[in-house]
Image (cartoon, helix red, strand yellow):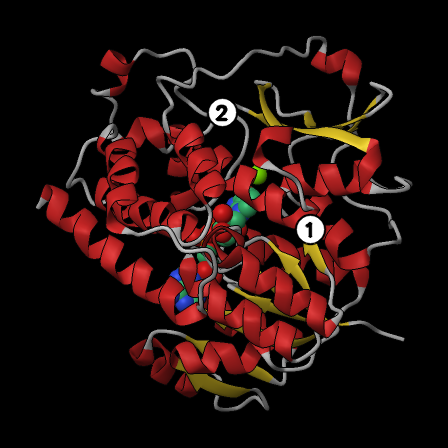
Amino acid sequence: MTKTLAVLGSTGSIGVQALEVARLSGFEIEALTANSRTDIIEEQIREFNPRVAAVADEKAAADLKIRVADTSTKVLSGAEGVEECARCGADTVLNSIVGIAGLAPTLAAIENGSNIALANKETLVAGGKIVMDSAAEKGVAILPVDSEHSAIFQSLQGCHGKNQIKRLILTASGGPFFGKTREELSKVTLEQALKHPNWSMGAKITIDSATMMNKGLELIEAAWLFGMKAADIDILVHRQSIIHSLVEYVDNSVIAQLGVPDMRIPIQYALTYPDRFVSPVKQLDLAEAAMLTFEKPDYETFACINLCRKAFEQGGLFPAAVNAANEKANELFREGKIGFLDIPKAVEAAFDCVNAVSDYTLEQVFETDKTVREATERLFI
Ligand code: NAD
Ligand code: MG
């Protein structure tokens, strides 16, 4: 039987690649959503003929309604429209929305019983406990799309119990600035930060890779996905992005997943798991790669990694706070309003904006997000 799929954030870097995978694997598309790019989503609607589509921006949604009036796709608008698409009942809902805007749609899809293919890591960082509890209660799977987490998930196939795992090792490319000093980082430009050595991605995550906040967010993501303590997750800089992550077992045997840096591999595995299908992705040629290198991260210069580790260890709303500070600072940096090193500064300042709590509600996550964004803005402007 044909599997049905919804792609939230279908106009983005991951969304477009997810539709390419869906096209080749013959998925039926139930729903598509975007923030504003009506030209791209119009084309996608014409090709995939989804039952429903949504555009978060109200004006853009009105534009899309006119553009696709001759099709049978129902067009919804606003954050509620995106959530309704998440509730479309597809077998799998792939969430590739960027930022905390993905949290409510992830929960809506889980509540409606769809499996989640998750690219939107901010969802797990900000609301990890709520998302994982809700998925367990509904009996739905959260399949990682993030390449490191897909690598760990693949390396865990055949594992006979969590007590056999010693640690997870997340690899990091190090981004465009690995090896630079703080002094050098204080002068980097937006253009330099947007030049990732190995991956072509959306602007927000590309900046997160340059600050290595991305690895901090991924550490929290891995802790929730695989039920690990932060202390049992290590980071290893591997500049070539060929080994996507590793699992060390108690007998010191290490299992890793390798491949060329192409997101269509982890996207496809999340959609076709437990099966594997032929892929158009380039074959890995290790002789051509010739050398794989490994180094320790420079935790002092790239302070965001350990700030995320600390936030996860302190628990409660601290991860939501560091995520919000980073989202806001990342945006201000892309707007040319703050410097590169102001991003870790903002993330550190977020710890003063929240109190320790042992349990939290979704409302508190959104409240924390709002308070910390405002505080971050006040820090600089
Ligand atoms: P992107 O900026 O290219 O695309 C983001 C998508 O989200 C777009 O379709 C956009 O329309 C939509 N969107 C943005 N704001 C929205 C809002 N307020 N409401 C609804 N929709 C909104 O981003 P991307 O690079 O594809 O990344 C998406 C997610 O996947 C991020 O969480 C990122 O960390 C994660 N991720 C990306 C990559 C990658 O290779 N690009 C790899 C691993 C993980
Ligand atoms: Mg990643």
Q: Position of residue 79 (x, y in %)?
A: 40, 76
Query: Ligand 2 is found in which quarter of the picture?
Result: top right
Left-right relation of 205 to 20: left
Q: Which residue is mark 1?
A: 267
The residue at the far left in this view is 381
Residue type indicated by callout 2? Pro
The residue located at (48%, 71%) in the rendering is: 104
Amino acid type, mark 1: Ile
Q: Which residue lies at the image location 67% right of the left edge and 66% below the top edge? A: 135
Give the Cα separation between the discs numbered 2 and 1.
21 Å
Which residue is more in the foreground, 304 or 267?
Answer: 304
- State the image quarter where residue 118 is shown: bottom right
Disc 2 designates what residue?
A: 197
Q: Is the N terminus in the top left, top right, bottom left or bottom right quadrant?
A: bottom right
Q: Is residue 258 visible?
A: no
> Contact, CB < 8 Å: mark 2 with mark 1?
no
225 left or right, relative to 95: right
Asked where in the image residue 365 lies, by quadrant, the reply is bottom left
